[in-house]
Image: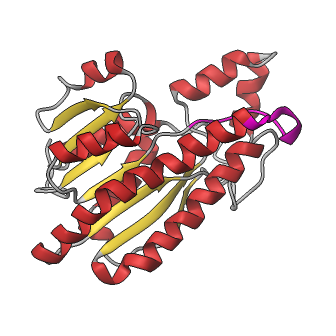
Amino acid sequence: MTSTRLQNKTILVTAAAQGIGLATALACAREGAQVIATDINAALLDKLAHASPGIRTAVLDVRNADAIAALAAELPALDGLFNCAGYVHHGSVLECDEAAWDFSFDLNVKSMYRMVRTFLPGMLDKAEKEGGGASIVNMASMASSVKGFQNRFAYGASKAAVIGMTKALAADHVKQGLRCNALCPGTVDTPSLRERIAAAPDPVQAERDFIARQPMGRLAVAEDIAPQVVYLLSDESRFVTGQVVLVDGGVTI
């Protein structure tokens, strides 16, 4: 059943071909939004193109500023942006060379900078002209400035940077109608997590360990996270900005 919580809103989602991005794109479309679903994986994105009439797909490498600018030139001004693309590097500082560090920050942080810097002017202009508001949701993590985890050195540092960037954006543009919040999920059962489990020396034990750290006793699924993104993109969150929103199954109780 289609709802109207996001009716007449244009929302762009990165990394929308699988996992949390996919669940969010579908959820936003169900709530009446016109969704621009982007991903670097053209094959997976093609499957999403036929999932809903409210979804338009576009192949996008969020590490490519020219590609982002070209896409923005084709689109109307956005009401909402969900920066979901990211990468989990496994290892301590001793296993993190400069290439791994640079890639983590380029994808996890600088890509959001590129997206926001490109799309924000149009979002603010639309908010001013129409008297509404704009919302940006940045994917952070409980593994960040919130909590430290073993073997998440580059990832935790990059996601802490996302939280700092989110708060700065919120503070700079709150009077112009922008809300900006950071979403911090717990461990979510996504294709990315399954790849990390499969790469572990003992995959069975690795999965048990991931489950054990959630007090609720299970991994999250993408559909546990998507409703929170919908809320933050909708007018229901019109008085919420600059927040670190945890959806972690009780890990940080």
Main SS of the magenta segment?
loop
Residue 180 in the image: x percent, y percent? 41, 67
Residue at left offset 79%, top offset 34%: 97
Q: Is 175 situated left or right of 201 in this image?
A: left
Residue at left offset 13%, top offset 39%: 54
Q: Where 26 falls versus 147 (above or below)?
A: above
Residue 214 in view here: no
Q: Is 245 situated left or right of 34 in this image?
A: right
Which is more toward the observer, 230 or 83?
A: 83
Residue 167 in the image: x percent, y percent? 52, 71
Q: How is the image coloured?
A: secondary structure
Which is more toward the observer, 63 or 160?
A: 63
Which is more toward the observer, 149 or 236?
A: 149
Number of labelled discs?
A: 0
Q: Is 5 situated left or right of 232 in this image?
A: left
Residue at left offset 74%, top offset 28%: 208
Res 128 quadrant in image: bottom left
Classify the position of the C terminus by image quarter: bottom right
Residue 201 in view here: yes
* Boundaries of the magenta span: 87-98
Residue 185 in the image: x percent, y percent? 56, 49
Q: Is 54 situated left or right of 48 in this image?
A: left
Q: Where 178 falls versus 214 (above or below)?
A: below
Asked whether 194 falls inside the magenta stretch, the response is no
Residue at left offset 25%, top offset 70%: 124
The residue lying furthest to the right in this view is 94
Q: Where 209 falls versus 109 (above or below)?
A: above
Residue 21 in the image: x percent, y percent? 39, 38
Asked whether 92 falls inside the magenta stretch, the response is yes
The residue lying furthest to the front in this view is 66
